[in-house]
Image (tube, coloured by chain):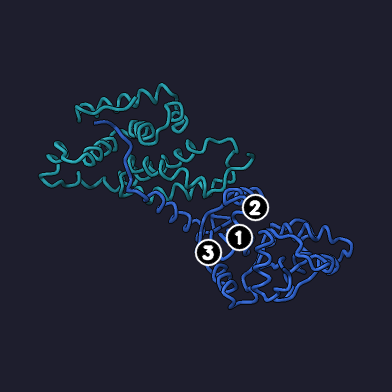
Chain colours: A blue, B cyan
Amino acid sequence: MSLHPPDPAPGHAATLAAQTAARAAEQGLADVVYATVDSPLGRLVTVATPRGLARIAYELPNGGLDTILDQIAARLSPRIVEAPKRLDDVHRELDEYFAGRRETFDVALDWSLVSGPFGRRVLAQTARIPFGATRSYREIAELAGSPNGFRAAGNALGANPIPIIVPCHRVLASGGGLGGYTGGLDVKRWLLRREDRSAVD
Amino acid sequence: MSHPPPFQRFLDAQADDVLRFLIASVGSHDADDAFQETFLSALRAYPRLRPDSELRGWVLTIAHRKALDVHRARARRAIPVAEPERSPGAAHQAGTGTGTGNIEGDHWERVRALPARQRAVLTLRYAGDLTYAEIATVLGSNEDAARRAAADGLKTLRMELPNVTAPA
């Protein structure tokens, strides 16, 4: 007989941790909330602030959940909790989009992970490309006010923190090639086919 | 790393230790609320945390303060009330203990009845698994005083429960 640590019921600490995280989100104590969600394109990490959705990350191509959250902690705030309920609307709209029942998104966006005024202009123009349409990197650079800045535009698109909803997959190379994509080119092809642009193969 | 880790990772990593400490210190019934209060307080203070802070000692310090709040609230409630009634069989059962769980539970119940400092040192040491140096930091005391409080507490426990031993 000895003074051993108490043995809580299995899983009880995890349950309490989840309840605590949900309460922290409800009370506005967390600066950032996140969730993970399965999709036809692999697992996604969704991240929101009180202002709106700040990040959608393809989990594996972005180095996994820990790497993604470390970057958010450094860029925004370490007060991050997992609060899936707070991302229900985002997940519902993504599900509808993947199922072919939605062409535009209505959730509020937080652009604070976008670097620099040019980057913001590039992604703002990208957000206006309609479902089913595409633009070239050069066109997007022009629309963003820098006709010769197509390389910089490419960089800004590559760093798009909110892919799918800010549809950088609709921006292609001038010659009709696919260009690049944060989730890999297979994912870009999948998205373009979903939007009936299967000509790019 | 110049930033503290994402709070969720800290919460997941410390949840088990904090819950064990709180069950020992305030009992299962109040441990759940104290757990949430501990981590909500930790979250409020999180951005001010120094990057080199030792997170386990830090969160157990907060948990220790929440446990003190629970004990103080109990003391206030208990003032006009006598010792809670026990069924006639309870003392006998606790003494003979047919199940290991009962025996262990009874140990911590006795620890909870010790003077505040002894209770704090024993729960931080044997449920929180802190060293005496770390406990001294939590209590704003020194290592020798922490060791003496532990020894005094264990002495009382051994008188009540002759078989009690504590891992070194």
**In the rendered image, which quarter contains the C terminus of chain A?**
bottom right
Q: Amino acid at mark 2?
A: Leu
Disc 3 with disc 2 on a shared chain: yes
Determine contact: label 2, label 1, CB under 8 Å: yes
Within 10 angstroms of label 2, few (less than 14), some, or many (20 or more) residues?
some
Within 10 angstroms of label 3, few (less than 14), some, or many (20 or more) residues?
some
Q: Amino acid at mark 1?
A: Thr
Q: Secondary structure at mark 1?
A: strand
Mark number displayed over residue A111: none
Output the chain of dot 3. A
Disc 2 with disc 1 on a shared chain: yes
Residue at 39 percent across and 26 percent down: it is B146
Determine contact: label 3, label 2, CB under 8 Å: no
Mark number displayed over residue A76: 2
Q: Secondary structure at mark 3?
A: helix
Output the chain of dot 1. A
Pick whichever, B94 or A103, lies toward us: A103
* Residue behind mark 1: A49
Residue at 21 percent across and 41 percent down: it is B102
Lower position in the chain sequence, tag 2 or tag 1 = 1
Pick whichever, A162 or B73, lies toward us: A162
Residue at 71 percent across and 66 percent down: it is A169
Estimate the x, y position of residue B135 in percent, counting from the top left. Answer: 43, 30
Outermost left residue: B88
Does residue A77 appear anywhere in the picture? no
* Residue behind mark 3: A86
